[in-house]
Image (cartoon, rainbow, N blue to C red):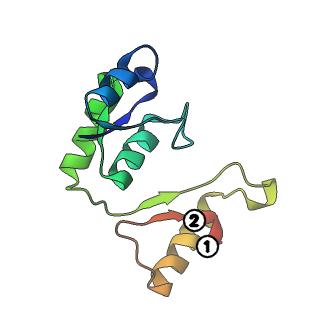
């Protein structure tokens, strides 16, 4: 089995035991994601076609429910970044204007992650 381990499964004897049993194991450190958010670990597992192994059910159960409910798709994720320089911080009217520009341009929104700051 191809397995991606969450950070909480990398210590101890689990990795050598899984590999000795013939499993193809990938760790977050090997993927450059040690300490990353759980959603990124799931993303990496999906990208690599691996089952994710974790002890962190309190985080992965709702993530799983979200993916199941959305049937692996979503209607778009629109982000407002606050880490940009102050001149790029968006007020309510900036957000409305960016949405209008996005719609007017006919840009695809479904299944997209869009930073509205770029549409000011």
| Front residue (pair 36, 75) | 36
Position of the N terminus, as image quadrant, is top left
Label 1 sits on residue? 119
Contact (Cβ within 8 Å) of mark 2 with mark 1: yes
Q: Position of residue 65 (x, y in %)?
A: 22, 40
At mark 1, the secondary structure is: helix
Q: Position of residue 86 (x, y in %)?
A: 80, 54
Q: Where is residue 23, by image quadrant?
A: top left
Mark 1: few/some/many CA within 10 Å (<14, 14-19, 20+): some
Position of the C terminus, as image quadrant, is bottom right
| Front residue (pair 57, 88) | 57
| Front residue (pair 29, 72) | 29
Above or below, 87 relative to 101: above
| Front residue (pair 65, 28) | 28
Q: Position of residue 10 (x, y in %)?
A: 45, 23
Label 2 sits on residue? 116
Above or below, 103 relative to 65: below
In the image, what residue occupies the spot 36% across and 52% down?
A: 48
In the image, what residue occupies the spot 36% across and 19% down?
A: 14
In the image, what residue occupies the spot 80% across and 60% down?
A: 87
Q: Where is residue 64, by image quadrant?
A: top left
Q: Is residue 70 left or right of residue 44?
A: left
At mark 2, the secondary structure is: helix
Q: Position of residue 117 (x, y in %)?
A: 64, 64
Mark 2: few/some/many CA within 10 Å (<14, 14-19, 20+): many
In the rendered structure, find residue 57 and report the number of the disc placed on it.
none
């Amino acid at each position: 089995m191809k397995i991606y381990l969450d950070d909480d499964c990398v210590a101890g004897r689990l990795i050598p035991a899984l590999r000795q049993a013939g499993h193809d194991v990938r760790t977050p450190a090997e993927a450059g994601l040690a300490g990353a958010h759980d959603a990124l670990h799931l993303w990496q597992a999906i990208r690599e076609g691996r089952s994710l192994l974790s002890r962190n059910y309190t985080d992965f159960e709702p993530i799983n429910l979200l993916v199941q409910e959305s049937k692996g798709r979503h209607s778009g994720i629109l982000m407002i970044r606050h880490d940009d320089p102050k001149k790029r911080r968006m007020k309510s009217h900036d957000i409305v204007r960016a949405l209008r520009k996005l719609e007017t341009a006919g840009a695809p929104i479904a299944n997209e992650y869009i930073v509205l700051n770029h549409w000011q």
